[in-house]
Structure formats: C-alpha cells, structure tokens
Amino acid sequence: MNNEKFGNFIKKLRSEKGLTQKELGEKLNITDKAISKWERGISFPDITVLNSLADFFEVDVSELLNGERGKKEEIDIDKKIEEAIEQYKNIEEKRKIKLKKIKKYVGIISLVIFILTLLLQLGYYCILRRYNFEYVLDILPYIVNEVMITSLCISVLYFVNKMPNKKVILASIFTVLTVVNIAFMANNAFKNNCIVSISQNFSNEVILKVDKESGAIKIYKDPKLFIFARQKEQFQYESQGKIKRQWLTNDICSITYLDRDGNIREYVATFGDRGNGISYYYVTSALRGDWQVWTQNGEATQLLSDSNGIRITKNGVREQFDFSECKQFGTIALVLYKDDVPKYVVALDENCELDDNTDIIKKDGTITLCEVSMNKTQKESLYCMTYKSEDLTNYDVIAVKANDYELKNGILYISYDGKNNIEVPGDFSQMIKGYEDSQYQISKEKTVFFYDKGEERFLVYSDNMGKSWNTVEIAKDYSIESIQFVTKDIGYMLKFYDVAVGTAWGRISETIDGGKTWTDIFYGIGENDEKVFSRGSQIKFINENVGFLTMSTTMGTYQQLYITRDGGATFEELKIIDSSIYDFYELPTFEDGIIKVEINQGSDGDYNGGDYKEYYSKDYGKTWESL
C-alpha cells in the first residue's frame, strides 16, 4: 500500500465534493488536522473511520486503500490497515530520528554562536574599549547580548536533559535577561543618530555619530570587522537636519551638513595616500598645472593651480582662491572656501602618483572636482592640460613658447627658450585681454611689461633675462600703444590720451634711465595745435637716433611712413618709391644691421594679384634698394 497515493486520493475525492478539510471533518465528526495528516501521508484512519470515509465518497474500501477508482479486489482489510499502520510507524520513527538530528545541529550551532558572541563581547569590554573603540552602531552591543541570550537558552534546551521543568525555567531566564537587556538598550542605544557609509568597493567606511540633542558630530576611524571603530575627532560645528555623504573616490568621502545657524559646512574623510605614505606633502603643490574636464560639448570646467592660488572656472563663472582659502584634509583632498563658505572639494584620484622629487602629480593622473551643496552634485574628472615629462624638476604650470608670454590666473609667465618659464612679478589680473605685440618686449637686453591695478599702473622690467625685476609706477591717464627699448636704459613709448574716429592725440616719450622716468619728446604729425597720430600708428626705433612712425587711414587704404634721425625729436615722411599703387608702408624690421620695409597696396589694392614691393637699407635708412 502506497501511503502517499492514499493521501492524494483522499484529497482528490474531497476536492471533487468541493469541501475543505474542516468541512469534511465536520461531516465525519473528526478534526481537520487529522484529515491534513491523512492527505500528507503521515497518518492513517482506523477501520471504523475508513468505512465511513468509503461510504461518504461512495467508493469501495479496496478502492480507497489502493488509491484509485475502479481498482476493486478481494483484500484483507485488517491486514492492509496493519501494513499501513506499520508503514506509518516507520515513517514516524524516521521523522523522529531526523528531528533529533536537527535538534542536535541546532544545539551545536546555538552553542557555537553563544561562544562567538561571548568572545566578541569579552574582546570588546576587556580589550578594545581600553583603546577607545566603540561599536559602529550604539544598538549593536544589545543585539549581540540578545543573540547570546537566545543561543544560550537554545543550546541548554537541547543539551541538558535532566533538568526538571526545563522549559519553564529557560523561558523565565530568557524573559528576565531580555527585559533587562531591552531596558539598558532603551536607556543608552538611541542617544545618537548613527550613520555608516561604505565606499563602492567596500574598502573603507565612514562612521558618524550625531548627538540627537546637541547636534554634535563625531567621526570614527580604524574600523575593525566593520562593527568596531575608534573616534577620530569631533566636528567643529553642530549639525541640524540631514548629513550628506558622497564618495568622490574609494578613499575620499565628502561630508556636507548645515550647522545650527543654517550655514553650510564641509568635512572630507580621507583614508589613502598618493605619495610614499611616509612624508607629508601639500595638495596645492601636487595640483600645480592647468586642469580641464575632458568634454567636447559645452563650456569646459577648468582648475588652474599656480603660485597665486587656485582658480576655478565653471559655467562661465571664474573664482580665485588664495592659499589661505584652501583647507587640506589628509594628503589627498582640498576644500576651497570663499568668505568662510565651502565652495568646492578637490580630490586626488586613485590613479594619481606623486613625483618623488617634486611631489607633483605625474603624467596621466586625474583629479575630481565637486561643488559643495546639500543638493545632489555631480563630480567631474579633470585632466592636466600642461605637458609633463618624466623629469618634473623644471616643470612649469603652463607651456610658453620661446620669446613669448602666457597669462594665467592673474600671473604673467614668459619664456626665453620655450622650455623654462619665468614668472613676472605683479598682479596681472586686470590684463584679461593680454597684450598686442607692440605693447611689450622680451629680449636678452630688456624685458618689459606693464599692468594696471585699480587706479594705478606699473611698469615692470628686467635687464638680465628675468633674474631680477624692477617695478615703477607710471601715469594711467593714457593708453600704451607701443613700448620699445633699444638698450637697457634707452626706450620709447607711444601713448594716446584721446582718440576720435581714425585720429589720436598723444605723445612719444623717452626714457634714458631704464624706464624709471619718462619725458615727452614728440606730439604728432602736423603743425602747432593740429599735431596728431593715426589710430593705428606704431613706432619702431633701430637705435637711440633712428626710428620710424606709421600714419594710416581709417579704412587702411594707404599708410605713410615717417623717419627720425634725432632720437624722436623730429620726423619726416619717408618716400622710398613714388607710386599710387604701392602706397601702404609697413613698419620696418631690423636684423643683422639691415632695415627691411614692405610696401603693399593696402586694403583697396588688387593690382597684379595684390603683390607688394620690398626694400632694404644698410645705412640706417639713408639709401634704399629693392629686394
């Protein structure tokens, strides 16, 4: 006889009648639990119930015992029932043996859990607490206590057999210990708001405990087993409301919150290092260079770090941060402040490697820039746009071509060889548009620039290729159109006081003491009060005596060239050729003792394809020959 087949047949017959187990039990005057056991094959009805069951379902007893309709045969019912009961006894015996094994395993596991939790608590109270470690969550020790109480009671329940009233005693002990544990938990576990944040690769975690009453914030470090940690420090300001956490890298976490006065505050938890892990270094120094976000669309985000501080350009807005406005966290993060308000977090990415000699980030290292806000913010990865070689000993913030300059972050850089940069002293933040070629000079004999600062103007110059510099204040009531030195002491400046359409009123000034003082020597072309320059006039001096001045029309159709042979005191027009076609004289060039002048057709010239004539002089402009 198949017990499972018998149970399924009973279930099928009941379903055909549309009865529940409870309804069938009521009709047979037995419990629904008994019927459930029949159908699951773990019990069997006695012979009196068996006959009632067969009559109710209108089947033969043999059909019932065989578990299917139509299978009628002469059977010994008593024998069949006896076999079924014996079979059920075997099943019950196996079930008891299995249950006994399960109880044994549960007891062993409970004992192991008790021992582990006991050792955990002993390790904490006897060792870790001496070194100021705490549970990450204040509720954890009470949860551990409850696990320990429960596992102890279960292990005693399954291993101690001779204890009278065992279940009652264990239930009492469990209840008393649990009530005591809950009482301590209610009194101690909910004073702080415990916050745990884990990095994306699970390598680091930030643990914060915020006093619910005072708002004081404590941060913890040195996590052990992810459940213990030691207090690192308490934040300077108490908080109100939520605390925002954002992992910038797997070892840098930005923590943003509002203090009691509603001011935004920033703290950066750091866990790593980008150097050798031994020596301390400054993030501002490591950042030196021009960094930009790698994007092809929209306006690029830029970070420039140099000796003048850090400048951030984002969404068209430019902000300058002095070094006093930069606060370093660990050795891999920086917070930039403006008026004591945190504005940006700068993080050294995990691919950053510092040069051993300079502590500057090596080639291919990137940084992350993120705005400080209680709202959701996007972190941006920036790449260094300044060329970096293997040797960073002579590394410069920006690349400058030979005998040229670059303006960055209010700092002026020049280079004589295209390899080494020199920083010109002064505040060039107002010189945003830069300089025309005629407004500065870079040469071995003399290097000179000017800059405006507020209502003042300064001339800064060097006579020894940037080894030393001099700065003098000059008047600011004019614009400097040209400045040129023929020796380290003698120089000339073309300056305009006023302009109208194509005419300019101004002066040519001379210095003989290197730029310290200037004297006006020429007032323009013309007679008496009508002496003027053109709006596009330029000067070019060959030496302290010979120089040139251009005078052009507004539309650029022709341009006259004037020459001086007395150091700028007087000028006379220079006509090399008499032509109405070639009538636009360019400013001469001077090299290796030869003066060259290009004469073209101006903006209205199209003769012979718009070609030009070129002449040269070897006697400082006395005679000219065609090239």
Image (tube, grey):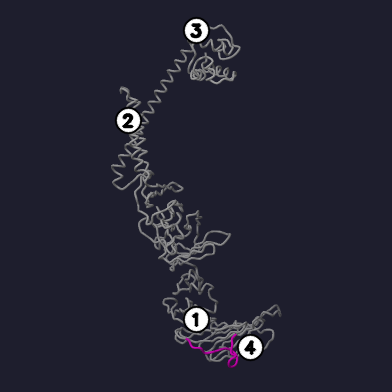
Q: Is residue 523 magenta?
A: yes
Q: Which of marks 4 and 3 is nearer the N terminus?
A: 3
Q: What element does badge 1 sit on?
A: loop
Q: Where is residue 603 in the image (x, y as percent from the top left)?
A: 67, 79
- 100 lies left or right of 531: left
- 509 lies left or right of 139: right
- Do the CB atoms of the residues marked 4 and 1 lie less than 8 Å apart? no
Q: Position of residue 199 (x, y in %)?
A: 44, 48
Q: Position of residue 520 (x, y in %)?
A: 51, 88
Above or below: residue 406 compared with residue 614 = above
User: Residue 602: which quarter of the image?
Assistant: bottom right
Q: Does the magenta stretch include residue 169?
A: no
Residue 78 tag number: 3
Q: Mark 4 against mark 1, which lies toward the viewer?
A: 1
In this picture, which residue range is highlighted in magenta?
518-533
Q: Can residue 366 be seen in this view?
A: no
Q: Mark 4: which amino acid? A: Ile
- Do the CB atoms of the residues marked 4 and 3 lie less than 8 Å apart? no
Mark 1 Cα-neighbour bin, 10 Å: few <14, some 14–19, many ≥20: few
Residue bearing mark 2: 173
Q: Earlier in the sequence, mark 2 or mark 4?
A: 2
Q: How far apart are marks 2 and 1 (CA)?
A: 93 Å
- Do the CB atoms of the residues marked 2 and 4 lie less than 8 Å apart? no
Q: Mark 2: which amino acid? A: Ile
Q: Mark 3 against mark 2, which lies toward the viewer?
A: 2
Q: Position of residue 309 (x, y in %)?
A: 44, 66
Residue bearing mark 1: 476
Q: Distance between the residues labelled 3 and 1?
A: 127 Å
Q: How far apart are marks 2 and 4 (CA)?
A: 119 Å
